[in-house]
Image: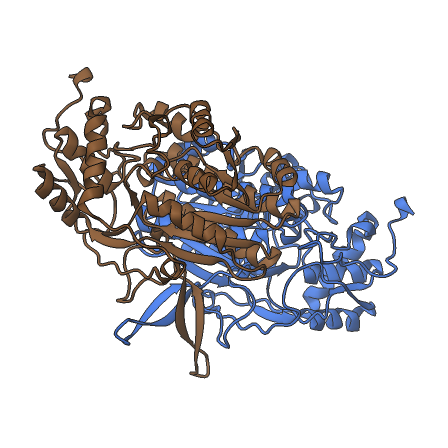
Chain colours: A blue, B brown
Amino acid sequence: MKIFVLGGDGFCGWPTSLHLSKLGHDVTIIDNLSRRNIDNELEAGSLTPIRPMGTRLKTWQEGTGRTLRYENLDIASNYHRLLTLIGEQRPDAIIHFAEQRAAPYSMKSSWHKRYTVNNNLNATHNTLAAIVESGVDVHLVHLGTMGVYGYGTAGMKIPEGYLPIEVTTDDGEKIRQEILYPANPGSIYHMTKTQDQLFFAYYAKNDGLRITDLHQGIVWGTNTVDTMADERLINRFDYDGDYGTVLNRFLMQAAVGYPLTVHGTGGQTRAFIHIQDTVRCLQLAVENPPERGERVKILNQMTETHRVRDLAQLVADTTGATIEHVPNPRKEDAENELHVKNDLFLDLGLEPTTLQQGLLDEVTNIARHYAHRANLDKIPCTSTWTREQRPGAPQAAPRHKETV
Amino acid sequence: MKIFVLGGDGFCGWPTSLHLSKLGHDVTIIDNLSRRNIDNELEAGSLTPIRPMGTRLKTWQEGTGRTLRYENLDIASNYHRLLTLIGEQRPDAIIHFAEQRAAPYSMKSSWHKRYTVNNNLNATHNTLAAIVESGVDVHLVHLGTMGVYGYGTAGMKIPEGYLPIEVTTDDGEKIRQEILYPANPGSIYHMTKTQDQLFFAYYAKNDGLRITDLHQGIVWGTNTVDTMADERLINRFDYDGDYGTVLNRFLMQAAVGYPLTVHGTGGQTRAFIHIQDTVRCLQLAVENPPERGERVKILNQMTETHRVRDLAQLVADTTGATIEHVPNPRKEDAENELHVKNDLFLDLGLEPTTLQQGLLDEVTNIARHYAHRANLDKIPCTSTWTREQRPGAPQAAPRHKETV
């Protein structure tokens, strides 16, 4: 298959590109390197030493004999170049990771809110409009988030995208319907993904586009078998307060001797998936497209749920790290239950990689190996959801040596 | 009250600005004149001779002694100027009409789809982000559309924004909830309004913004008592295939001797409201804001529903015009029922101006009076929803003299 990977330089996009290339697909990465540029803005960076795209591609070519193509292109603003690429290359599938993906970054200021909205919505809509204008029958696979559902349910498992409901007519008759699960986003970033859903529903209905939307949980781990093959293929490891995600942050904090920063009570329950399963899910999604005219195919891309404070305790127990409950910079429920259906991927053959000591140790070892690259000042989450929230910083945080 | 009217040069915005000014409110119009610029692009224009903003403001000042302020500003792109205005003027309310509002225009090409998405979503989001950043407790009143609901129901009246549903838990228990009515937009334009709803829900939840969203039906009529006071205050009258709306188009077609262009069977049932009621509803909405912390207040701004072919027959019966069933350029159900609740405005004291011969004659007279300004070539709706639809043009249409 010919596959475009929009955002193929990022944390999920890079290992997905390698995985699909290894399977023999013809992969073109399209990326404007925005994630690396945001590192510059935040004066933060990947704990792991990710290489420039040129080195990545050359290393992959040398190691596997396979060629990854690359186009540096901002799909949110350069519509016509995207359209031309689709028309010329006629891809079978486009995988769309090309959105600003950090909730805290999206809440830092009005500029960051506006950037996230403008970038994410135009990127998604340009892709849809270009597919229609090109006339090419492309299968679009989009990386969404479990966060579109929100984290409160009425006591049922969160279904995969669509919720069966009953409404009462004026005659008192009850009618069963199935609707897009009512959106309840927890940040500007999550909100853009709920708006993406409306783009997808419309283009599937009006233009018969074939679209798969993957509602992914929080990704943990850093490497896949492909990115581990050569250090020059190494994947990103974000630990900073904006882009780092909870389990990876705890493992890194343990590795560098920083208290595990639990936001609030740590009663938040979230869905998780290992990065190796992410790339496997993307493969399964690409290989199993919906039919033309079908509604958007929505799958929950997660393998397990955990409560944040339980994860902190697990990491503390095995590493000896201390736990510190810090203010929650987010406006969210302090505690929630979460039960999620993920039958669709299990039916397609996914064998979940669940939380296990070996993989946790692997992440901790990587964090230890590159601990000298860490800037401890970048660990606290300083982006607050409103003026009332406080940064998630420990009382007396260990500090980065350069600035002490 | 100090009120900003975003889009105050447009068809609804201009008479609303006059109405609120006459009531003694301090009104600032903010508009980038995009609607007039689109006239240039389409080589079409208002049937009525609308005057430049400078003339409009001077005439209003001379006739009433009241001053309307005006800022030429693109709120979708010039965020910082908008923020400064809110911070300096500290308005009590902002009325937001500043979106591209024609469904056919939004479907003309990928450029028009992308312009509508980019303009409408950034305009709405910039306004919300600026209100939060300013710290001013502004009541935002947004003009939405009945089209967010779609035009199929399960046999009940369309409620005002929120739908009571029942969901079944894993234990088999039934739980009642109230959700935002599931969106089912019929064009890119309508889609942006469904995405606006998600902006509003999020900002009401996270930032406690006070927001009213008005789901308006199709507006008919052209003048209000205020725009009739002086010809230099005259309101727009759109009759072209992109911006003209159905009843006004029929009345104009009858006035100039053009067949009444019924799309498809004319079985579409739609909600309607007279322009005089629009301005009255805006007044009621501004005077009755939600509390801080309340969910978004949603009202259906319509007074009656009619089937399109019945309207055509009514106009034909009273004017002698002929009816022609033309291809439907839209992808939509050929026939639908529509029942809508509008109790909230009735409870606030709205006395509906329903379809009556006197008002229909008034519109026809205006159309006859300015018939010499009509370009008949601009009447057919040439914007098609997909490549499969055909333009809504009569078999042998009367033609504009200049081009014959």
Residue placed most toward the observer, B155 or A157? B155
- As displayed, is residue B78 above or below residue A198? above
Q: What x and y, as percent, mark residue B34?
A: 43, 30
Q: Residue B178, located in which quarter of the rendered image?
A: bottom left
- In-image side of A149 versus B385 (left or right): right
Residue at point 25%, 43% (across, down): B330
Whether residue B129 is visible here, answered yes or no, is yes
Q: Residue B102, located in which quarter of the rendered image?
A: top left
Residue placed furthest toward the right: A404
Q: What x and y, as percent, mark residue A368?
A: 80, 57
- As displayed, is residue B299 above or below residue A118? below
Q: What x and y, as percent, mark residue B372?
A: 20, 22
Residue at point 46%, 23% (across, down): B54
Q: What x and y, as percent, mark residue B361?
A: 18, 39
Image quadrant holding the N terminus of chain A, namely top left
Residue placed most toward the observer, A287 or B99? B99
Residue placed most toward the observer, B303 or A375? B303
Q: Residue A307, located in which quarter of the rendered image?
A: bottom right
Residue at point 55%, 70% (across, down): A152
- In-image side of B301 versus A282 (left or right): left
Whether residue B388 is visible here, answered yes or no, is no
What is the number of callouts on the image? 0
